[in-house]
Image (cartoon, grey):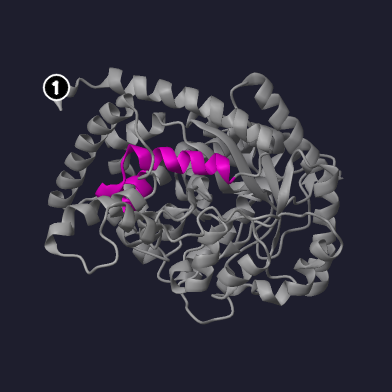
Amino acid sequence: MARSNARSTPVLSISLCFFAVCHMYPTPDDRDKLMKVEQFIFTGGNLLPTTKEIKVNDILMKIKVKEVTEGTKAGKFPPAMHFFRAKDLIEQSTVFNILRKLPKGAALHLHDYALLNVDWLVKNATYLPNCYICFTDAGGVRFHFFLNRPEKRLVMCSEWVLLENYRRQLKNVTEFDNSLIRNLTLVTEKPEEAYRSQGMVWRRFEDLFQAASSLISYALVFKTYFYEALREFYHDNVLYIEIRALLLLVYELNGTLHDKEWSIRAYQEVTRQFQHDYPDFMGAKVIFSTPRKYNNSFMKTTINEAMMFQQKFPEIIAGFDMVGQEDAGHPLWYFKNELLIPKETGVNLPFFFHAGETDWEGTSVDENILDALLLNTSRIGHGYSINKHPMAKWISRKFNVPLEVCPISNQVLMLITDLRNHPAANLMAEGHPLVISSDDPAAFGARGLSYDFYEAFMGIGGLKAELTTLKQLALNSIKYSAMSVEMKVESIELWLKKWDEFLDEVLNMFNRNEL
């Protein structure tokens, strides 16, 4: 894959000379010039705003400064708080409600079984006929749809109970349904007490994925779930999505099992139907994914399978990735030989590797951030540790390999507490290529992409992040997507139209004299 080297000349040096403060040590007289250099380098800082954008930015920044000031005084600034505690405050924010209307471009880092709010799963899927439930020894749940109650139990799970009958025996069905919702998310009132280590939160995270997948893998739910997920993102003003999909077996009520190809065709069919129903939605692609915990032999088979599907379904299959907790799985270099198979066989299989989702330094897992680039990844999933790796950071910038930054995920999964200190703050200050995504919004009690945009805009970007920052992030998401060149051109045209409508809406919403 050819790489752009458009940013190969150091941006800082060019900017300093442009503002006439290079070749000498700066003095206090250079302060204003240096501050302008910093703002110019900042994500979106080199975009020339239109008259309309300047007006909207004035409105937005006055509201933002007010909310930051009030939140700081009250000791309740949402990005500095755990998302589970901050969510209600975020939803009361005027900035957040403006960002919900913002055309956000694309969501490029999402996972198949945590796309759609779990309320839909509980209130719809679990009320379908023939839905059975069992309760695990660890306090979790599993679901399955059977024609008749099976005698065989899952390991470490109670006997299967028909949910329809179980609900009839309850005095408070609403409370029971709420407990199911809690079992399908990480949300809790006291996250610091519930999750005392990364190991604990990841075990709970993986358990809820198994619970959700046991519902979604039923054929009657599978397609509808994806359609409703597309609709949720669409209503959050997202024009296109890419999902990491495990392509687990999907089953029918009579026990028939559908393979990976069936699931791929289902994703393709649902996407086409959704685009027919909503013509201004640009589409969806699947990144063929597999857990990183398996051995080399399994990975070789999986890579060959991914190549075959990518060639057979180029419209829907974007490429390949490995998923799961990095610290608990094999590092990328462990699979070097398998990951080189596409290149050695002349097959173009784009990679979208998770890498650097760790707070360790110097471990083999920590080296994933550099190895992902050496293995020619198209984007870096998370890339949380990249600031510790100057060579990886340099390669990423020089060759335009963006990071998929997922603020809420990084906080909930205990990489960081205060999002003002997120490593992406440094990247944003340097204008590093990056996009904002939401990873597993359903697991975190979020919806779509707006919550993560809020955290990035208010916390990571701080008061330096302005309207042009939001514009650049949205344009980045289209630029760095797996869409074809033609689709990107079409998407940008559509996005610019929606952007102009957004600017008009904000101007109509606020009387500048009242701010």
Which quadrant holds the C terminus?
top left
x, y (%) of residue 396?
54, 62
Q: Quadrant of residue 451?
A: top left
**Looking at the image, is 430 positioned above or below residue 437?**
below
Q: Is residue 197 left or right of residue 346?
A: left
x, y (%) of residue 167?
57, 38
Q: Is residue 9 magenta?
A: no
**Closer to the camera, 398 or 300?**
398
Q: Residues within 10 Å of mark 1 (few under 14, many from 20)?
A: few
x, y (%) of residue 6?
54, 52
Furthest residue in direction bottom, as rendered: 362
Q: Secondary structure at mark 1?
A: helix
Q: Is any part of residue 258 visible from this angle?
A: no
Q: Quadrant of residue 335?
A: bottom right
Q: Is residue 476 magenta?
A: yes
**Looking at the image, is 53 positioned above or below residue 381?**
above
Q: Which residue is mark 1?
A: 513
x, y (%) of residue 139?
53, 60
Q: Is residue 509 left or right of residue 145?
A: left
What's the magenta bit mostly, secondary-structure-wise? helix
Q: Residue at x 30, y 25 (%)?
A: 51
Q: Is any part of residue 335 visible from this angle?
A: yes
**Closer to the camera, 475 or 167?**
475
Which quadrant holds the N terminus?
bottom right
Q: Residue at x 52, y 40 (%)?
A: 117
The amino acid pointed to by label 1 is Asn
Q: In this picture, which residue range is highlighted in magenta? A: 454-480
